Image: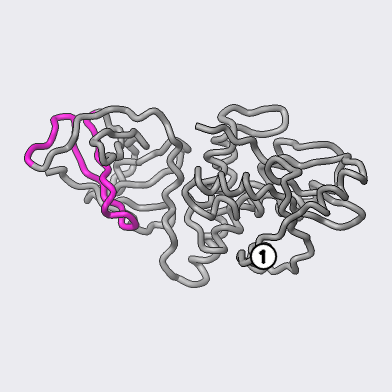
Amino acid sequence: MTHYRTFRRFAGLMLAGWLLIINSAVAQSGSRDVLREITDVVGLKPRFELQATTQVQNAAAVVYNGKRFLLYNPQFVASVNRAGRTDWAGISILAHEMGHHLNGHTLRPGGSQPADELEADEFSGFVLRKMGASLAEAQAAMAVVSDEEASPTHPGRSTRLSAIGKGWQQANTQIVASTRTAAPSAAPVAIASQPTPVRPVANSAVPMNVVGQIVFRDNPEQRYYLTSKLNVVRMQNNSVGQVVGRVARSNSASFPYILVDAQDRRLYISAQGGVFNNQGQQVGTLSDPS
């Protein structure tokens, strides 16, 4: 799989370099006004200039001559959208870079710092939930562009996904409390990994290692099975399964089991087999596989 570099802020570029970047920027005609959409949901005026340019490898929040710019490489954004399988991936990149501006990171000298990246990630998650994205859609870009391990400038993937989730949940709590409407799916993004083979599930017989079936309301056609080892397996069309989570026992009589995914996101399984999110909403059902 192609490796994508993480978002990076640029500092200390020479004046000639800035002019080259700005003059070579290409506006995408007919595209949605994402910049205004992002600022609208946080109640701000779009006092940034969005520039598409091939002079940056990914995306950057920069200040030049007192003016704030959001620079992005359209080829990079398009590739992230393809890898994340959603246009929300590219929007989250711009929201992340705007978070650097609004949190004052671009006013300080120096390059990227882990704490700054997490603040921008949290802002991105908050904004995307306000715009209507599910948690998985808000995390889609970071799931494919971030490195698994932390570096001196950027946190590791799981930490960054958690920061996005924190911002998303904060916005979700505000929205649900104010509107009392059904929320988008709170199921987090599944990190691609080497599929774990399991025995195929046939209509005529259930394999001995499958003890339950999980159906989520937002995607009832996708098959998930609980194995005897308490792994949650997502079945593919080729009858090969991918482990996407694990079920563990809890100390609660009402919710005796907890479903935990690779990012430590949790859903709660009731004694009757209902699957609930952190807001107490039922999002799925665990039942007998037969």
Horizontal side of 34 relative to 144 (left or right) equals right
* Quadrant of the rendering where the C terminus is positioned: top left
Horizontal side of 110 relative to 229 (left or right) equals right
In front here: 241 or 209? 241
Q: Is residue 221 magenta?
A: yes
Residue at 44%, 60% in the rendered image: 184
Give the magenta range: 204-228
Residue at 12%, 36% in the rendered image: 206
Give the image location of residue 83, x and y in percent.
50, 43
Give the image location of residue 26, x and y in percent.
73, 56
From what the image shows, is residue 177 above or below residue 223? below
Give the image location of residue 121, x and y in percent.
63, 46
In front here: 76 or 197? 76
Crowding at mark 1 (Cα within 10 Å: few <14, some 14-19, many 20+): few
From what the image shows, is residue 234 above or below residue 179? above
Horizontal side of 189 relative to 249 (left or right) equals right
Q: Quadrant of residue 151?
A: top right
Give the image location of residue 23, x and y in percent.
83, 54
Q: Quadrant of residue 288?
A: top left
From what the image shows, is residue 130 above or below residue 64? below
Residue sitting farthest toward the left? 204
Residue at 35%, 30% in the rendered image: 195
Residue underneath mark 1: 42
User: As shown in the figure, which amino acid type bears the numbered disc 1?
Assistant: Val
Which color scheme is applied? one colour
In front here: 282 or 195? 195
